[in-house]
Image (spheres, rainbow, N blue to C red):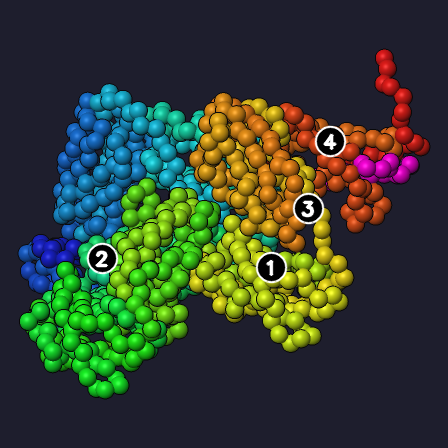
Amino acid sequence: QTGALTVTAVSPPDKSTGVAVNAPVQVQLSAAVSAVSVNNSAIRVSAGGTPVAGTVGINSSTVLTFTPASGLAVSTLYTVTVGGFTDLAGNAVQAFTSSFTTGTSAAPDTSPFTVTAVAPLNNATAVPVTTTVTLTFNKPVNPVTVNIGTLSATANGVTVAGGYAVSGATVTFTPLTPLPGGATVTVGVGGVRDLAGNGNQSFNSSFTTAATTDTTAPTIVSVTPSNGAIGIGSNGQVVITFSKSMNPSTLTPSSNGYYNNITLLANGGRLQFSLSVSADNRTVTLYNFGTSFASLPAASVITLVVSHAVQDLSGNALADFQSQFTTAASFDTSHASVVNQRPANGSGGVGINTPIVLFLNKTINPATVSGAVHISQNGILVTGTATVTSGGEAIVFTPAVLWQYGALVQVFLDATALDTSGNTVNVYQGSFSTLPDPATAAPGVVNYNPLNGAGNVPLNAVIEVGYSGALDATTLNATDVFLYRNSDGSHPAIATSLDSTGTVIRLAPTAVLVANAGYCFYVQTGVKGTNGKPAATFNACFTTGASAQTTAPTVLGVSPADQLANVPVNTNIRVLFSGPIDPLTVNGTTIQVSAGGVAITSAVSFTAAAPQKGLAPTVSFSNGNQAVVITPESPLPPSTVLTLTVAGVKDVAGNVVPTSTTHFTTGTGPQTFGASVVSTNPPANATNVPLNVAVSLQTNAPIDPTTVDTGTFSVFDNTLNQSIAGTVSVSPSATTLYFLPSTPLATGRQYRVYYNQRGITDLLGNLLCCGPGGDFNFTTGFAPSTTAPQVTGVSPVNGLTQAPLNAQVVIQFNEPVNGQSLTQVTLSAGGSPVKVFSNPTNGNQTLILVPVVALSANTVYTVKIAGVSDFSGNTMGAPVTMTFTTGSGVDFTQPAMTAIDPSGGGIPTNTVVKVRFNKQVAVSNTGILVYPTAVGLSIIVPGTVAVAADGLSATFTPTAALQPQTQYGVYLSGITDLQGQGLAQNGVTVSTFTTGAGAQTGALTV
């Protein structure tokens, strides 16, 4: 916890009058206080500067009470000062003062504290379901004592959620959602106190709401851990938040040790757990898992299912709900940390409407965030809204009002924020500053063209200097704005003007520049902004080339790559051009990220080794203005198809770059780790490598393809002591990088592959590093590979019917294939192509086609596989074509094995193994493994796997007879349904059998 501890409520309220002489002073704090730090000076009460004697006590972790040693004086103004203590993290309480005035009576107030009026009236009927409840007491109310435990409203006996407002003697309760129609609503008060500490007399009142039919079904607005979350600690909690108060009797029924309507599934079985429902019946927390009621099983997929039997207070049913997450491999005691801040920590010139985003490396419990985020502006805390997004791994703070110009904004996240395992986050502090007020600030240089030090500048270059504010055109003259030719000291004639925005100075030579000459352009002290402030001076120099430029550069590459799926929501957007561009033509319109045609707000910057003279810290350049990086201000929308459009960018001579449009799809959350290599081809220190090998790297995160070239990914001949020629490429999934040598490698020679921290980055800009030993060696053999890859299986199988609408196509090859050769692998319907994400996996030996849009019902689809080559460039011959037909619905149930044979003893040595499933499955050649149990999985029986036409069974056929009198095990691995959901029995030996003396050759007869 790093934010200041604050007072959220005080009694007597500030400016109260007529306060009884026996009134204590109570304060409510924003966080739990450190009892050690609290003493009698924590709350100081004084009259006319004279302290009042008394003691300070701790009522609860967040409430302190000052009790005067004797009665207060009548008709006296008292001042309350709070300070001098800390919260549990050591943060000092923010200074707080208030005042109140006692009444004229010296007698202590011990009179009864009662409710004198209630609205709606007791026994009222036909009350609108949108009503608020107002209680009027006979004396002012101590606001610190009003909460759901002391003042509640129940509908038909069930507590409803809502908020409280205290004003003098009146308390107003506002339900979160409309009350149920035709319900008896009971208002109960017990424990509310007046300013003198007198507790209220017990009070109950009831009314009946109008017979208004509530037809709005409840929904689940959040679940923690979020769907698809990984690495969840086994000691965490599952928190479900509904859109309205629920009927608790539909949340808690159970039988045989399990809850009926809320289920957790793991490893093919059902988990026991404890369940608690919040006081307002909106939040359900699951904890104490398993038969020992301790923790979730480690390294397991946990599925949460909430049934439609769950209802709200009006009897509206929830739609069936399912969510899934994966537990970590071991007990989670780690603390979440902030890994990135937007705007960047220490940045300046931030827009006054910019939200604050904190990305964390663990999933956060959203219920713990609002009180843990503290934002100050010029040292004063500001109000705003903190929300948890991106699968629980991002906090977005939006201020209630715009930031001030020229303000220092400090960001604090304290340790009261918890992850889903209940661990505190590591405290965090960051800052940034907003841009100066353009109405009063001197205009500063933000960009210019051509680049300082640039060479080969075209003779028709556009010379421009861009400023942060509008300029006064009358101050532009030949003395203060001029072009200088280095060779003769002349000032070539120019026409000086401002662009349509009034912020860009254009220096247009009246004649073409001289070839191969050095020039400098200057803006001197006389130029002023329209606000009268002197503009920043500036100069830059360049050297011309031999000719004018009439053809614009093109977009060489973008990141994320076109059609890339599961892109982190905190990705950068990078565009690489084939030549220098004019940075003053880059903005949110010319390089735009959009969803459904709606632009996403971004901050535009240029990548560079170091910022250039006169430029804002967020703008920098490299590679001669050929690379542009866009950092979105907020997380990109999850699970959304986004469009990246480059249109209107110009080069240094004003030629317009051809329009480029690409698409990518975000995943469910951010990436909070740096990319590293998880496997290589060939492996490190491999020998006898084919001479026509294509070197590849597999990474744990998508790679920015615009950072991959032969300078960042290379192969070095250790014998000749030089790099070899070759080309590099990136797979469609952006997780495999290829280096293809231009000529066959030399025989029996050692080569070294370089990539570690040499400039390749992931989508967030982190350098690719590490891997299994980092840069590595391999040694070639004496021959190339000449066999083309073959298709060994396709799912859905050929001729399958009733395929679900959320099916994906899985293609299995007999060897790794070149990701760049997969463009002729297509999915079509009625001859029209279906747009898909093409994702090579399993070391490029498996290709998954995921349709961008759900498949159409009752439709025949065709899968065509053609032109695929292996890492050595061998290309398959005749195309492979398969068809399947969809059904009418989706399917999210988990696949499971329902039967298997053979089993037992005396099994013929020529037996086949057949496995039946509860739904259609995809099974590769390694999905069913048969092995002798005496030696284990180190020896696998060779054979082939075939999936039945209905997709409900698969048969393993050995290519040779099994050994007689031998026990074999059947191990299932990597089997999925058509939606990619893993088989419950994956990774398990599901059966054993023992062979007899020989094969069975006779026909089976009755």
At x 16%, y 66%, the residue is 503
Separation (CA) of disc 1 from disc 4: 38 Å
In the rendered view, tell whether residue 666 sits above or below residue 180: below
What kind of element bears circle 4? strand
Separation (CA) of disc 4 from disc 3: 26 Å
Q: Which of marks 3 and 2 is nearer the N terminus?
A: 2
Residue 960 drawn in magenta: yes
Q: Nearer the viewer, mark 4 or mark 2?
A: 4
Residue 995 drawn in magenta: no
At x 33%, y 60%, the residue is 551
At x 34%, y 34%, the residue is 245
Q: Which mark is residue 788?
A: 3
Stretch in magenta: 958-975
Circles 1 and 4: CB atoms closer than 8 Å: no
> Which secondary structure class fits the magenta region best?
loop
Answer with the quarter of the image where residue 545 lies.
Answer: bottom left
- Residue 113 percent location from the top left of the image: 18, 44
Q: Which of marks 1 and 4 is in front?
A: 1
